[in-house]
Image (cartoon, rainbow, N blue to C red):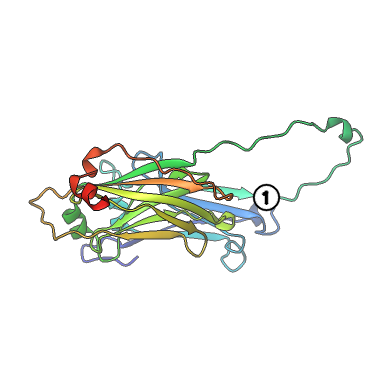
Amino acid sequence: MDFDENGLADTLIVSVVINFMLHGFKSYAGTHITLEILDETGEHTVFHKESSRDTIGKQTKGSFILCVRRRELEASSCVSASYDKFTVRCTLKKMQQATKRRCLFGSLRKSNAVLEPPKVAMVGSHTLTVRSVSELSATLRNGECIYSTHFAVGGSTWYLKFCPRWGILWLVFASKGDEMTPTTAEFSFEFEGLVNLESQKTRHTFDRDNDDFYYHLKYTGTSPTQDDRLVVRCCLAVVTPEEVRTTIPTCSTESVLTPLLSAMHC
């Protein structure tokens, strides 16, 4: 919808509609849907949306919708240049109440083994590369962004997005529908190329109502004739509920640690 002067759609709508009555289900209760748009390799998530308990119901007639901007889709390397297509993945879960069955030998089948929770990496980093800030600014409109692929740290999913016209970078805690547990993280950003600097370490708690953190990057105007590539690296550590301090990894890009920054820390 919202076609531009060239007849191209500004907004694309990806939707899934479930006809439960056709498959014998009596209600939408217990239905959970995830919609994802993958990068051009078809392996990594870039855009996603998950349903909550109240999303799927009679009012929506069993439909679930994800809207994306065409320019953001192309800028985030989701569209295959060779075939002019992109990949959508839909995952549907229908939870049913388990039927309790009486087991005469239930006490004999109980195990004394203690299952340990799966180990997850509490520290990690992720990179977003902008080949040309000026070209990206000319392609996108005000408020539109380039998105990174999703990455996992501390059992949570994160992604970066950057608005070239505003010079704002966001670290976003990806929504998990109703399973969005408040998570505290310490992180810093390193920039290389158009701007060479390292931000201060920041601690922030992410939850359903506060799911992102933005950093305003100041730089002068750019032009297509200059090399205005920008590499953004986010170094992130998830803090455990016991408030055990976790050290944020130091990125190995020494070109970011300029003598100017060394003087500023003195």
Q: Which residue is drawn at 44% across and 43% down?
A: 247
Residue 117 is situated, as x and y percent measured from the top left of the image, at 63, 38
Residue 225 is situated, as x and y percent measured from the top left of the image, at 7, 51
Question: Mark 1, residues whose alpha carbon is within 10 Å: few (<14), some, or many (≥20)?
Answer: few
Report the front residue among 103 and 172: 172
Residue 52 is situated, as x and y percent measured from the top left of the image, at 58, 59
| Residue occupied by mark 1 | 95
Specify the amino acid type for callout 1: Met
Q: Is residue 150 visible?
A: no
Quadrant including the N terminus: bottom left
Image quarter for residue 38?
top left
Report the front residue among 29 and 200: 200
Mark 1 falls on what kind of element? Answer: loop
Q: Is 68 situated left or right of 56 in this image? A: left
Residue extending furthest right? 104
Q: Is 239 situated left or right of 135 in this image? A: right
Image quarter for residue 257?
top left
Q: Is 8 situated left or right of 67 in this image? A: left
Report the front residue among 262 and 74: 262
Residue 229 is situated, as x and y percent measured from the top left of the image, at 18, 47
Residue extending furthest left? 225
